[in-house]
Amino acid sequence: QVIQKSPRLKSKCNIYRNSITAPDHIGGLKTYQILSKEAGGEDGINPQLAIIDELHVHKNNEVLEMVEKSQGARKQPLSFIITTAGSDLYGIGYQRHEQAIDVAKGIVEDESQLVCVYGADKDDDPFEESTWIKANPNYNVSIGKRAYEKESNKALVSSASLNSFKRYYLNIWTQSKDGWINDEIWNASQWEFDEEILKDYPCYGGLDLSSRSDITAFSLVWQIEDKFYSKNWFWLPEDKGSQSADKNNINYQEWVRDGLIEETSGNVIDYDFIIHKMGELRKEYDIRTIAYDNWNSHHIAPKLIDEGFDLVEFRQGFKSMTAPTKEMQAAIESKKFNHFGNPVLRWMAGNAAVRSDPAGNIKLEKDMKTPNKKIDGLITNIMAYGLWLDGGDGGVSYLEEGNLYIM
C-alpha cells in the first residue's frame, strides 16, 4: 500500500500477491516475500535476510527451521527474531527465548547470536513505575504512563487481565491465558523424596484412555501423613491421530527419549500392552483401587477386572470432579502434592482451564480450539485423589452415600 501511494516507488517495483521485486544498487533484482507463520509452500527460498516477528504465536517451529536451513547457502545471512512474551511455555517462542537468555548469561557460548531482551523479572512489582520503565525502553516515547496506569488498574482486579498485562506490557511469559493453576505455584510443589518408600504404602490409581489413537494416562497417588505423592505413566500409539498430544509439540520426541511417554505399536493404543504394564506396577506397588472413566474404557475395563484389579467408575460430571479438584488444588498451593517435577504433567497443568456451573461446582477442561493440548494426566490424578477423599483413610465412603460419584 505504501509503494502504491508513491509514484516513484511504484515505478520501480513489481507487486505480487505476497511478494515485491525491486532493483538493487548493482543492477539486479531483490525479492521481498511474506511467509505465513504456518509452513507450506516456502521450500526452495534462499533468503539473505529473514525477519520473524511475534514468534510466540507460531504454532510450531517448521517455518523458523525452514528459513534458517535455507540460509545455509548464503555467506553472511542474517535473521531477526522478534517477539513479545506469550502464554505457551512449551512453544517454539519460549524455547528460543530461554536459549537466548542462556547465551546472554554466558551459560551457552554462541557468537552467532546477539541477544537483546527488555522485560521485568518475575519478582518485580508489576504495579511500580520503575518496573514499567525497566520493561520498556520507549516508555513515555511510543507508549505513555497513562496507558500503563489504565492497564495496571485492570490487572489489580482481574487475574486474566494481570496475565495479559504481564505479557504485553512487562514482557513476562505466563503459563496460560486463563489457566487452572499458576506455573510457579505448580513447580514449587515438589521436594526431594526417596521414591522407594512408596512401595511400603498403599496407593490409589486413576486411568483415562481418551481415544484409541490418542494419549492414555495412568496415575498413582499416595498419602503419607498429610502429604500426597504422584507418579504418572503416559502412552501413545506410534501412528498418531491429527489431534494427538505430539501434534506441534516440540518436546514430544524428548519425552519419548526420556521414557516419560511410551509409544505402543500400530495406529491405536495397544490395550494388552497397558494391561501388562499395569500388572507390573501392581507387583511393585500396593494398588488398592483404580478409578476410571467409562468413556472409551468399555474394552479394557473387563480385562482389568479379569486380571484382578479393583475398578471404580468415576464419572466426569461437575459434582464428581468438584471436591477432588478443589482439594488437590489446595494441596498443590500448600506444597503438599509432590508431582516430582514430571514435565508432561506440568505441560498438562498449563493446558487446563476451569469450567464452573451455576451452583459453583468446577471441573477442568482443555481449550477446544487447541485439541492437541492435553490434560489427561491431571484428570487421572484428580480421580485417584478422589479415591482418597472417598475413604482412603478407612472412613465412610462417599460412593456408598452417593455424594461424590454422580453426574
Image (cartoon, grey):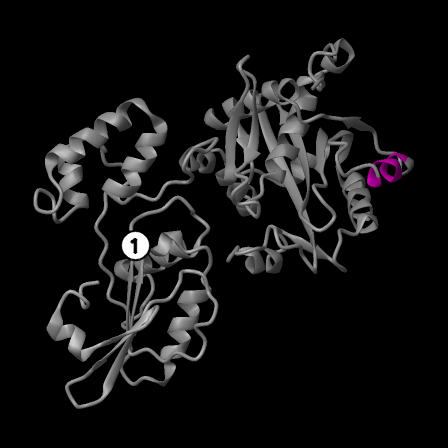
> What amino acid type is highlighted by mark number 1?
Thr
**Magenta residues (range):** 299-305
Horizontal placement of 399 versus 246: left or right? right
Judge by depth and name the residue closer to the eye, 82 or 30.
30
Residue 254, given in percent of the width and then of the height, sits at 55, 59
Residue 178, given in percent of the width and then of the height, sits at 43, 33
Residue 131, given in percent of the width and then of the height, sits at 17, 38
From what the image shows, is residue 40 above or below residue 165? below
Judge by depth and name the residue closer to the eye, 275 or 249.
249
Q: Residue at x 62, y 35 (%)?
A: 230
Q: Residue at x 45, y 55 (%)?
A: 59
Q: Quadrant of residue 321?
A: top right
Secondary structure mostly seen in the magenta stretch: helix
Q: Quadrant of residue 267?
A: bottom right
Residue 115, given in percent of the width and then of the height, sits at 25, 61
From what the image shows, is residue 338 above or below residue 113? above
Q: Residue at x 46, y 31 (%)?
A: 181
